[in-house]
Structure formats: structure tokens, C-alpha cells
Image (cartoon, grey):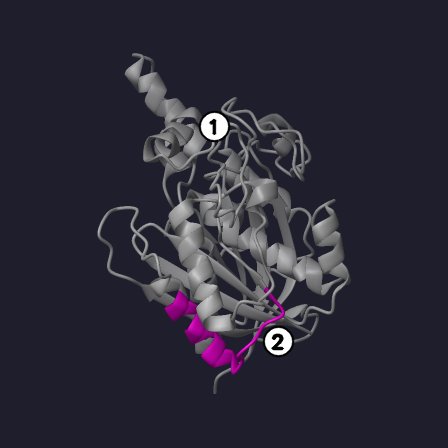
Amino acid sequence: MNPAIYISEYQYLYGGLRSLDVLPASFGFRYPKSNIELYQGLSDPDRKYKDLDRSALFLLHLADRMNLDTEQMGIHIGSSRGATSLWEKNHANLKNGLQIDVRSSPLTTAGNLSSWLNQYLRLGGISNSFSATCGSFQHAFLNGISWLKSGMLDQFLVGATEAPLTEFTIQQMLRLGIYNVEGVCKPFNFSKPTGMVLGEGAGLFVMKSDPIGAKARVVGYGWSSEQIQSATYMDESGLGYRQSMQAALDQAKLDQVDLVLAHAPGTKRGDQAEWSAITACLGEKQQVHSIKGLVGHALGASGAQNLGVALDLFNGKSPFEDKLWERLAKQDIHTILINAAGFGGQSISLIIEAI
């Protein structure tokens, strides 16, 4: 028995960063800007969740907007960096001779994202966190597929979250030479590559083996891990992308899709590799777009944002107040391929179809 996998209930959020101010820009945000605003409205009589990192609060904020049947539900959450702000705050206190918070470890450990969501929803079941750089959401998603296909559970709450708009994180990107200091990102701009811009965001999706209430079906997935020559290496021909995309296409028994939602962070090498792979697998006329020019790169949560955008398009809803995306929402889009890649040579591709 090899049951189909469906996606039903979902919510996602996004944000971006225009400059090196570290503070988020005012455009395109679907969530409050401060921890206090994020916390307000949560059901928390014991104030257990008040001091969580933004990355964890994003998840609780989304869960509140969902109609969840929590019986026998597991949780898988991906994040590249985890509780970034809290970790950096405690480390800065230590370096400055101040006392760190006694809860610094439980509030910044890798598993805190899924465990706090589990606590908030009172699930009492299995909860896992995954960190696989920018492919973190897709890894969580694939693991959800394996659990559902095994028959161990009938539904999973799968998602990702990232809140990396901190000075130290941005300085790391600057040191790599891939960051745009003016906050401008133009993916696939090969004549004049812009570089990447960090964003924030999260997404939650209910994955089920039951088609009732489903908004999409998972029809293909593939992955690859190419051999790297440096910590940030990616083969210029898009070898990893080609392998993951072709595996997904083969499983879905497709040679074309209606739309590719590309990883495309705006970096010269990464964008070129992905474009080469897309044209090799799907041809020069394939419709391809990246959301990162609007919302920035939310690292491990970027795949969750792409999946949320895909589901919006299936529903005829524009995810952004933007002419391109408003036009896409009016198209008859039935199949969408979503790419992700991360440090370490990883590539993952998913294909979903509308129901």
C-alpha cells in the first residue's frame, strides 16, 4: 500500500529587509513587527510563551489562525538557524559580563520550535525539529511524507520558521560576499546579479493521507546531494537541481509543469545553477518565478513560503499586491514544482497538483 499525500489546512507569513538597518521594512508584512505584538492575543494564562524567540512565536501566531483537528497529529518543523535573536542576546550578555537567562538553553535548543508548538496546541504526541540550511522545510516535509506512508500516523503538522534579521547573521552574509547592502534583490538578473537579501517568515501545513478537505496533492519529490569543493559550492551546471527535479518529474510522470517556484536567492552562482537545471529538465519556455525579490530569503522557511504561495495560486488568490502575481492567480495553474537548495550540496524538489 502506497497512500497518496494531501495538503489541506495551511497558513504562512513573510517579511523582508530593505537595508542594513536590521529592522524589517514596512512592505509586504503579514505579521506584527515586535515580540510583544506577536505575543498579544495568544492564549497563555501562565505566560509560558511570552519570552520565546520570534521564530517560535511565528508558529504559535500561525497555529492560532488555523482550524486544526489535533487528534493523532504529529509535528515536524524545519529551521536553518533556530532561535537566532535569543541565542545572540544571551551570547552578547555573556561577552559583556552580564548574567545570561537561566532559560537560555531550553529556549534556544534546536528542538524548541516544535516542542513549544506541541505544548501550545496540547498535542502530546511526536514533535521533531529539522535543520538542513535552506532546505530545512523540505526535509521536514519529506519526513512527514515518510511517516504518513508508513501508516504510523494519519496527519502531520509540517512547517518551518526563520527569524534571522539580526546584525550578526547579516554580517555573516556580508562576509560571504553575497549580500546586497541596499536591500535590493532581483533573482535571475544575470546581466547584473544583485545578491541576496534576508527575510523572515514561517509556514504551517496539514499533511494527510485522507483527501477530504484537501487543497492539493503531492505527486512528486526528489533530492540530491552533490559533492562540494567548498562550504558554499554549487555546480554551475545545476547538477544537484537537475537530479532532484528529474526525480520529482519521473515520480509524477510529468515532462512539464505549469509553474516553477524557484529557490533563486539572487546570488550569481546559485541562480545560474538553478536556471541551467530548469532549462535542461523543462526547456527554455518554462514559466519560472522567485518570490525573493519581494520578501527576501527566509533561509530554512523559504520553502514553506513557496508552498504557501503555490496553494494561494491554486485557490486563485494572489499572494502579493503585485501585477505579476495577480496575473498568475488568474491563470489555470494545475501543477507547480518547488525547488530548494542549501549549503552542503543539497537540493530538493517537490511537485504538487491542484485538486
Residue 142, relative to residue 66: is it above or below? below
Q: Can residue 152 be seen in this snapshot? A: no
Q: Residue at x 50, y 74 (%)?
A: 220
Q: Can residue 220 be seen in this snapshot? A: yes
Q: Which residue is mark 2?
A: 210
Front-most of residues 212 and 333: 333
**Residue 230, horizontal then vertical, whole percent:** 23, 48
* Residue found at the far front of this picture: 191
Which label sits in the foreground, 1 or 2?
1
- The magenta segment is 242-259
Q: Main secondary structure of the magenta part?
A: helix
Give the mark nearer the N terminus: 1 vs 2: 1
Relative placement, left or right, of 277 versus 219 is: left
Q: Which residue is mark 1?
A: 181
Residue type at the position of mark 2? Asp
Secondary structure at badge 1 equals loop
Residue type at the position of mark 1? Val
**Residue 100, horizontal then vertical, whole percent:** 35, 21
User: CA gap, disc 1 to disc 2?
Assistant: 46 Å
In magenta stretch: residue 313 = no
The C terminus is located in which quarter? bottom right
Q: Residue at x 61, y 32 (%)?
A: 39
Q: Count how many numbered circles sit on residues in the image.
A: 2
**Residue 302, horizontal then vertical, whole percent:** 51, 49
Relative placement, left or right, of 199 versus 230 is: right
Disc number at residue 333?
none
**Residue 164, horizontal then vertical, whole percent:** 46, 35
Residue 27, relative to residue 9: is it above or below? above
